[in-house]
Amino acid sequence: MAKSKTKRAPGPEKRTSRRKDNSKSKRHPVAFAPGVANPPAVMTDEVINDPAELDELANEPQAATASTHQHPPQTMPIVVILGRPNVGKSTLFNKLTGTRRSIVGDESGITRDRIYGRVEWLTREFRLVDTGGIIPDEKELIPANILTQARAALDEAALILLVVDARAGITPLDEELAELARSMHKPVFVAANKVDSAKLEADAMEFARWGFDEVFPLAAEHGTGVAELLDAAVEVIRAPDATDDKLEELTLAIVGRPNVGKSSLVNRLTGEERVIVSAIPGTTRDAVDTEIEYAGTLFKLIDTAGIRRKGKTDLMAEKLSVVMSRRHLERAHVAILMIDAIEGPTALDATIGGYAHEAGVSLIIAVNKWDAIEKDTYTTKQYETRIRDMMKFASYAPIVFISAKSGQRVTKLLELARQAYAARSFRISTSEINRFFERNLEQPKATTPSRHPLRVLYITQGGIRPPTFILFTSSRSPKAKLHFSYERYIENRLREEFDFFATPIRIKQRRKKGGE
């Protein structure tokens, strides 16, 4: 009887045809531990000694900038939240979007980059942008960049929400920001926040002397006055009706230690200074969402805060940012783990990769700053070996050597992310999973507890994203479990036949009652 051809998850076959398009990026097999099937692709530099080939490569353009563009902002009007530090901008953002996207705390300056969200109100929708607390005359690097980020957001705004603290009244910094808002020549609403009494509501009207369109006394934390603000906002910006025809989004989280180049990668992919880049570790404190469209796919890039060891986080904002980074990782489909090529892989890199593995997201390992490394014939292989030794749990993850600064191979990350997303969404048909069982699992092929013999009765695919398989077993004892080596054997066979590129596989055991 001829062996039936097994259908594979989308991914590796698609990559083969692209190999001619990038002659400097080639794939090499990686040495894996015994029993690990289908080693993932590794994008690397191959040392070339042929003079003719060197001449040919010398005439090629150098590493290109990512050919991506941001999802057109004109599709939905944008409302920008503006204000000095610690007046409750992030609290208002979370209330309006119905999420906990922005970190909220008593420390000033927690939000630094632009954070985007969507608001739906009375069947209408618009995009909302939370900006960092602004100090216009501040000369230090990060506060100055926060102002730059805010100006970029104001340029695309249809409405500006100037948030002030009603308890503190008008401050000189509020006056400066009011002038900034006025200079944009756009509609401006004043959101007088922290109004929780009738007296404060009356006091809030002092902001009316600025002469802006509306003043709304509200308490963002409790939601008081928010409905009136939204009613007026959707009318002023002429917000369109919400539709169900939204493009499927591929959420791509960029994770890693502080200062490995995560924000630089986002800026390279978007083609603009979308997030603040600084040599100061911990510049990014909150995850920053950016939408770009590439090859017909809408990517939501999440630039997360750098994850430090627990003992290295002192400020409350830094502790929260680590927690939020892990939470944002859990909502992603694919994660790019950034590793600093200059410092090399560290134990903390492996820990962060473990977070992604536990969250069930597909994983791509990007070794950044590759252009700054002096390379010989063995450099790439040495890096691969070190990474694989430290991250044996993620043997399925492809390794890409990139430079976010120059753009070297950054678009390859998006291509691999698309392949990983297709693989993690792949569902094996019932007939194929049955044939897989007959070929690999019908006869015992691994150690089982001698006192309580058990065998696999059948296997089903219980879910996708990540692919999850359920083994129904038979045993007289409810405590009997298949040996972990048997689970590993099954995972290797699944990858061998269906690939599941860059994606973790979950295997669960269930005891089928009723005997053999």
Image: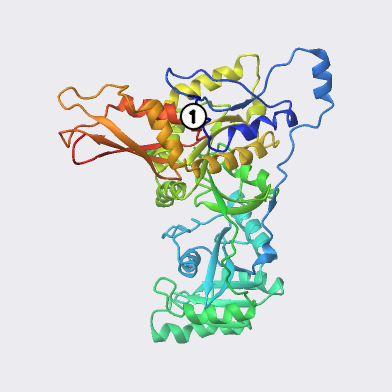
**Label 1 crowding class (10 Å Cα cut-off): few <14, some 14-19, many 20+?**
some
Q: Is residue 427 visible?
A: yes
Report the front residue among 462 and 380: 462
Quadrant of residue 52 within the rendered picture: top right
Relative image position of residue 452 (x, y in whole percent): 16, 27
Q: Disc 1 designates what residue? A: 497
Relative image position of residue 456 (x, y in whole percent): 29, 32
Please tell me whether residue 51 is drawn above or below residue 451 in the rendered image. above
Relative image position of residue 487 (x, y in whole percent): 34, 29
Report the front residue among 220 and 350: 350
Q: Which image quadrant: the C terminus?
A: top left
- Label 1 sits on a secondary structure element that is helix
Determine whether, in the image, residue 448 is placed left or right of residue 391: left
Determine whether, in the image, residue 94 is placed left or right of residue 46: left
Determine whether, in the image, residue 61 is placed left or right of residue 300: right
Report the front residue among 158 and 64: 64
Report the front residue among 412 and 6: 6
Please tell me whether residue 42 is drawn above or below residue 199 in the rendered image. above
Residue type, numbered disc 1: Glu
Please tell me whether residue 99 is drawn above or below residue 337 in the rendered image. below
Give the colour scheme of this rendering: rainbow
Please tell me whether residue 264 is drawn above or below residue 75 in the rendered image. above
Q: Residue at x 37, y 25 (%)?
A: 489
Relative image position of residue 75 (x, y in whole percent): 67, 65
Name the residue at the front extreme.
Answer: 1
Q: Is residue 156 visible?
A: no
